[in-house]
Image (spheres, coloured by chain):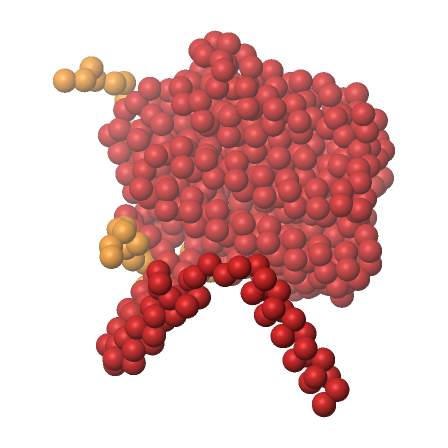
Amino acid sequence: MQPREPVGWLDRKENVSKVYRGVWLICALLLAVEPLTHKHGHFRFEEWFGFHSFFGFVACIALVLAAKALRRWLKRPEDYYDRR
Amino acid sequence: MTGAELSPAWTLILGAALVPLFRGAARGAWVVLLPVAGMAQLAFMPAGEFGQLDFLGEQLLVVRADRWSLLFAWVFLIAALLGSIYSLHVRDTLQPAAGLAYAGAALGAVFAGDLLTLFVFWELTALSSVFLIWARRTERAFRAGMRYLIVQLASGMLLMFGALQLLTATGSLRFEHIGLDAPGGLLIFFAFGIKCAFPLLHNWLQDAYPEATESGTVMLSAFTTKLAVYALARGFSGTGELVWIGAAMTAFPIFYAVIENDLRRVLAYSLNNQLGFMVVGIGIGTELALNGTAAHAFTHIIYKALLFMSMGAVLLRAGTVNGSELGGLYKSMPWTAGFCIVGAASISAFPLFSGFISKSMILSAAGMDGLLVTYLVLLFASAGVFHHSGIKIPYFAFFAHDSGKRCEEAPANMLVAMALAAALCVGIGIFPAPLYAMLPYPVDYEPYTGSHVLTQLQLLVFSALAFSVLMRTGIYPPELRSVNIDFDWFYRRPLPRFVGAAGNALGRIIAAVESGSALGWGRIEAQARVLHGPRGLFARTWPAGAMGLGVMAMLLAFLLSYYLF
């Protein structure tokens, strides 16, 4: 029997939800401060409001969904190359 | 004394040969001392060309110390030092010896001023590094090492052929700008491309690196591919094709990285992706872009080593780096988790971490040249690299669901190596000026503008948001025990089968021909036995006079034929 370890902060479900909400909050803050800085990009679309935010979010969703779809063709059992 | 002895490459290569003579603490001191001695040597090394040698009538230049080679030599020595400290707990003599010889070979290649010297060290990196894979001492690692070695030696052969063509055409072996149109240029380009893991030539990297030992992978991640980046920057800067090759390199490995289970293989894919940024910089070829490539290679070697070190520590302690079997390790290995997060933040180019001050130079260079598509691909890859390296690696190893694994924290020497690397990542991120001062061209670039910091933070934090949302909704693909087939499938599955089948078919044909012609063959054989056998006509000893007579008869026949026809 292992000695029982103390329950960590991240072990509680409600704290994980706090972290999750924290990410939303930081995102909102980053959009809120945007009008305060002068944005200058190499291309005009970079100066649109929230372009990088939108791009980052959509790019990652698309990346994961595409990768998930790719699994259908690429996934093999773990010992695939060891079989003769 | 030609000046060739100035190169720290010899210190490491000869020092590595002496490693087996030491035991215990003395060996530990020796392997740490060697890179430090190399650094001291480098600090006093003047810029210039040393070691002009004549070899078979060709001029060789063994040591060329300029801003390019000195920058890479510094970061190679830093990586060698980190790797040495990281492997101090290893009892196996082979690993530190091979690792240091490998680092020395990479240094020698960086200093090489001609293509023949480059070739020699190029092959030496392959030969020395394969032992870091074989040191795992499993059947799997042995096979992976064999595949690795074949690919690396093929690259060396292409380099040799290309160099010889160039020599015949120009009469010089000097390693300057080559370009695709030069004689042999294409061969050399592909030689560099194999080592640089161009798309479709890349698979040796993801195949072999995760099969090496914990400390072996740390060493491997630093040298071979960055040596190729250096060589490309010297020989092919401004080659437009590289922009497209590099852009493809940044984008496609990240799809694999998302679904890969072996976390060290995930890092190998992201290593490939980071090389893409450097290759784009070389392709653009402006001073800003080349500075960006050099700076990114420098920072990348350190944070990539840090990430591989943290995963190596996990492999050592938990016995696996499969995402499907890990999770919750932050309780057992809090320091390793912390260092891993620093590495993750650096590769993701968070402001105040080293990746931010180097990668942005390449993106800016692409933007300034108006390369819209490339710019968008790089932006996509920047978001993607945060997604799979920045979040996925620390998340699945140290957080996620609790796997129930409880283990010890990493050994002290590993923690020291990780702490040094992490300090460099943060230090360079906050004070980029010393690194900028070492770059090949004068730097007029300010990474910390309000606009740049904000847009980068937006890009990254919204990527994190995407990850969180996908996790909460359960859409994120779970880590599964599986392998994903990549281009190596072609030479690991159909090719051996084809060769096997072809061999069988050939065997059958030979058997059929043999049995069919056995009769005729038997007759020929009997005749040959009569003529050449122990008592045959041609087996007799003839007097020398007979030989003379024969020659005279032949000469006469020749003379006659000359007059007649």
User: Can residue B409 be seen in the rendering of this structure?
Assistant: yes
- Chain B painted colour: red
Q: Position of B423 compared to B438: left or right?
A: left
Question: Which residue is found at the position 26% from the left and 34% from the top?
Answer: B403
Image quarter in which the N terminus of chain B is found: top right
Task: Say which of B169 and B296 sits in front.
Answer: B169
Q: Quadrant of residue B29?
A: top right
Image quarter in which the C terminus of chain B is found: bottom right
Question: Which residue is found at the position 62% from the left and 35% from the top?
Answer: B105
- Chain A painted colour: orange
Question: Which residue is found at the position 51% from the left and 37% from the top?
Answer: B129
Task: Say which of A32 and B278 sits in front.
Answer: B278
Q: Position of B242 compared to B124: left or right?
A: right
Question: Which residue is found at the position 61% from the left and 56% from the top?
Answer: B158
- The answer to whether B278 is drawn above or below residue A12 in the figure is below
Q: Position of B24 compared to B455: left or right?
A: left
Numbered disc total: 0
Task: Say which of B124 and B233 sits in front.
Answer: B124
- The answer to whether A20 is drawn above or below residue B80 in the figure is below
Q: Position of B124 compared to B563: left or right?
A: left
